[in-house]
Image (spheres, rainbow, N blue to C red):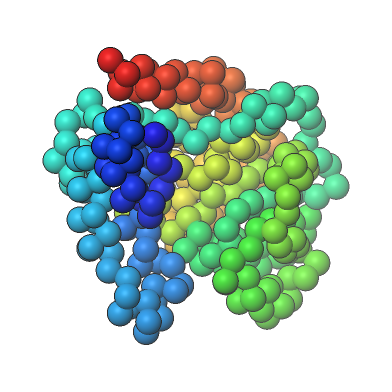
Amino acid sequence: LHIHDLRIAREGPWAARRFGIPWVLDLHENYPASLPHYPHAGTLLGRVLIWPSAWARFEARMVRAAGGVIVVTREASEELISRCAVGPEKVTILPNVAPRDFLQRAEVAFPEDRFRLVYIGDTGRRRGTDLCVRAVAALRESLPDLELVMAGTSSYQGALEDLVSELDLGDRVRLLGWRPPQELPGLIEDAHAGLAPFRRSRHHDTTYANKLFQCMALGRPVIASDCIAQERVITEERCGLIFRSGDVDALAECIVALHADRERLARMGARGRAAVRERYNWDITGRALVRLYANLRK
């Protein structure tokens, strides 16, 4: 039994006993650490009903009860082993790499009409989306061909739209809202670089954004904040630039650097694509899941 998400993990021990089968707990995020950053947790009712510390204790119990636990990064594994007092043999690292249809896309050239940046995913403020808009505003005069495309939505979407209007960026920032998954590769291919500007937190420090590997798979460098896990991948693979979390000026400097050196941009994109083909793909990472299942059957 493979249970994906802490919120339904309570059924794992019962089902394992009832049917006599092993169970796996799949923790794709640090849920207790991410809870305080959700808007509903900050409401009066949320503060009364949502206790991250209680969720952390529950997570520790479920981790110890499960036959195996899956996390997405090395950093998450180290944190979980320390906090939940379990051995490293119980934890399997299974990164959320790009799906196969991203890998099968044809080689593409960079668009020439504008210098376009793309952000894909939840547009909540904790993701640093407002920083992207403010960076475009800061570069309005120096980079007249700069454009930002954002595909996604959240409860913060209205505030983001207000910010674009307030800064008079209607011709420079396109907020597309939610887009179906099949459109995402085209949006990435139509850009020069992807953005992963998350504000640092215990959750963001130990997880990968899907957009990281999606952009890499399509040969696009990534401009990312210094959240520990994503910074490690980008630095090791030399496939993008890192800026200090929350620093609009540092983000703008990264954009200027890639805009000024298209050959460097292309080299970073090529290295990211090679890394996905050689390491960050399901044919490679999926072997860890097969080994986990095989070991539980013994």
In which image quadrant can residue 178 be found?
A: bottom right
The one nearer the camera, 139 or 188, is 188
* Vertical order, 248 against 188 (above or below): below
Q: Which of these two is toward me, 98 or 22? A: 22
Q: Identify the residue shown where x is 26% and y is 37%.
A: 17
Residue at image coords 59%, 49%: 195
Image position, residue 90 (x, y; %):
24, 29
In the image, residue 12 sits, relative to residue 129, either above or below, namely above
Would you say 9 lies left or right of 116 here? left
Q: x, y percentage for residue 21?
A: 32, 29
Which residue is outermost to the left? Answer: 85
- Could you tell me which residue is drawn at 73 percent across and 54 percent down? 179
Left or right placement of residue 89 versus residue 25 in this view: left
**Screen quadrant of the N terminus:** top left
Query: In this view, which residue lies farthest toward the bottom?
Result: 44
| Along the line of sight, the residue nearer the viewer: 137 or 12 | 12
Task: Kindly tell me whether residue 259 is visible in this rendering.
Answer: yes
Task: Decide: is 193 above or below 202.
Answer: above
**Which image quarter holds the C terminus?**
top left
Q: How many marks?
A: 0
Query: In the visual, does 68 lie left or right of 272?
Result: left
